[in-house]
Amino acid sequence: MSAIQETNLRPTGGTTASGDSPTTTERVVIASIGAIIAFLPLLIDNVLQSGLREAFGPDATGSGFYSRTFTVVVLLATAAVCGLGAKRTLDLLSSVRFGVSLLVLLAVACMVGMIVVQQNVDGFDKYFASLTPAQKFLYGKLGFFDIYHAWYFNALLLVLSLNIVLASIDRFPSAWTYVSRKKLDASAHWLRGQEQSATLGHQAESRDEVVGRVEAAFRSSRLKTRVTEKSGKVFVFGERAVWNRLGAYAVHVSLLTIFFGGFLTSMFTVGGQMPLEPGLTSNELTETVFDVDQLSRSVRQLPFTVECTDIEQKLIRKDGRITSDNTLDWLTRIKIKDPERGETEALVHLNSPFDYRGYRFFQASFVPNGKAREIRLRVTPEGGGQPQDLTITRGGAAVLPDGTRVEFKDFAANFKVGGGRQDESGEGEYNLPAATLAVTPPGARAVKAVAFTPEMAEQAPFARQPVAGHTWRLVDFEKAPQAHILAIQKDPGATVVYVGFTMLGLALMGVFFFSHDRVWALVEEKGEGRFEVVAGGNTNRNHLGFGDRFRKLVAAIGGEPVEVKKA
């Protein structure tokens, strides 16, 4: 091979397209492997079911994990591979067009997931009820209600990941050539054929002086420079950002990292909702489960218990209803009781989740039935005397100067006269607020008292009747919902996905904001102190910017321009 290479050596690498049809033997082998993969789950399932029946009786088995859909898909894929052959299948799987097609299908699936409300989203019950029976059946069969966990969505991710890996293997040798087998020399004819080239004349005492000028100009242009000599000719080669040739593979690794994180999320995420009222404790998560056209709830146990100590709703308009559009923030104060770590107190804001042992607590919704977080009572002795104001928090108590204990038991935003229970016809509205109290005089049993607003006491005689020697008026109260609903999720793939997106952002910046510039200069002696410098170069992107940099480089080399070419 000549010392002066006209082009880079670019190994083809990977598979090559073949027009030959697969042989009968090849088809038999492919069909056998496909059949084994398709029916192996059925065989394993039957063996496990039989063993369970023998060990625990006929009712011990469940539905198993065999899927007819899996078998049909594998058999269809096997038939396609038999028709194409192994080589053609590999060519297809490593094709960029095939990868773009998979991305389009994946985007369509994601659009369906955005249009159709998913079963783990708050408000899915109402959306599901609004659908027709035909829509429920069709969407359920197609997996639209949980599309990100559907088998075909995971299959698309799997095949796309395989496409990325095979395409990278197929094209990596060519890209690696720029790093491992640099083109250090070139003929004058080849240099003049580059997108940017120039021929300069120099007068100097020696060739080393001209080479020094060229080398200094290369270094001033931030090019990594190497000088070689072959057949009496001196070549100066300079490049920068050669790693940009491998930027696409950094993008591929980032995408695979994101897909892997998505797989971990899909397979191992534990999540659900937990309604919490002050004073109540729970360790159960409830999750909506969809089966064909029926909804049900599944329950998961947490390795710790959660006690709600307080809920608070910060309203925009204090006299308005308890609705999401009238809420600035809702706060839930909880106490986590963990057998391994003890007790941990936490506060969960609307946009400020709390993380504990890999679980993330965040606000999902609330039950808008009107309650009160705090009440202010005006208590007046029946026999006369100065009224006293008491402030009691939800579930709390206070003591009067005479020793009477007053406990805040319940609150009704729309008290139903006669039945004594709250009328929940107007959620979030406070039409007839009343506080239910437990009053315990010294040395006596507790009696029930209901404190109404002064306006109600003036209109209804029963509202101003004394109880336990006092009259009770509800002067003020802080509105609060009945319960907050926390969403609790343990997602092992979240961190992996975040790392993948960070890597993807950095990789894309490296790919699009930098370019691999290569410049060569051939220095030849023409006699009588005259030298000719032929310079040429190319880049893999941002050709306009490279043209400006090349012209500055030529100006830095100096000399008399003989020929200048612009791309």
Image: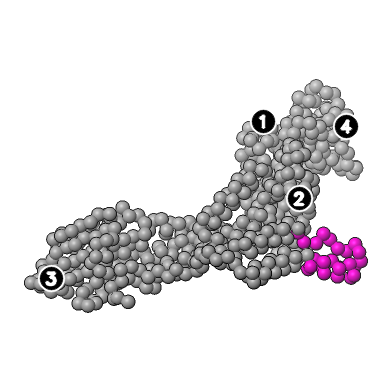
Characterize the local packing of mark 1: few (<14), some (14-19) or many (20 or more) Cα atoms within 10 angstroms.
few
Residue range in magenta is 43-67
Residue that badge 2 annotates = 289
Residue that badge 4 annotates = 419
Instruction: State left or right for residue 179 relative to residue 214.
Output: right
Mark 4 and mark 2 lie on one chain; the one further toward the N terminus is: 2
* Amino acid on which the number 4 mark rests in the picture: Gly
Would residue 265 be visible to someone looking at this image?
Answer: no
* Amino acid on which the number 2 mark rests in the picture: Val
The N terminus is located in which quarter? bottom left
Q: Residue at x 76, y 44 (%)?
A: 137
The front one of 473 and 560 is 560
Residue that badge 1 annotates = 319
Distance CA(mark 4)–CA(mark 2): 37 Å
For residue 44, above or below residue 321: below
Q: Position of residue 13 (x, y in %)?
A: 47, 69
Residue that badge 3 annotates = 526
The C terminus is located in which quarter? bottom left
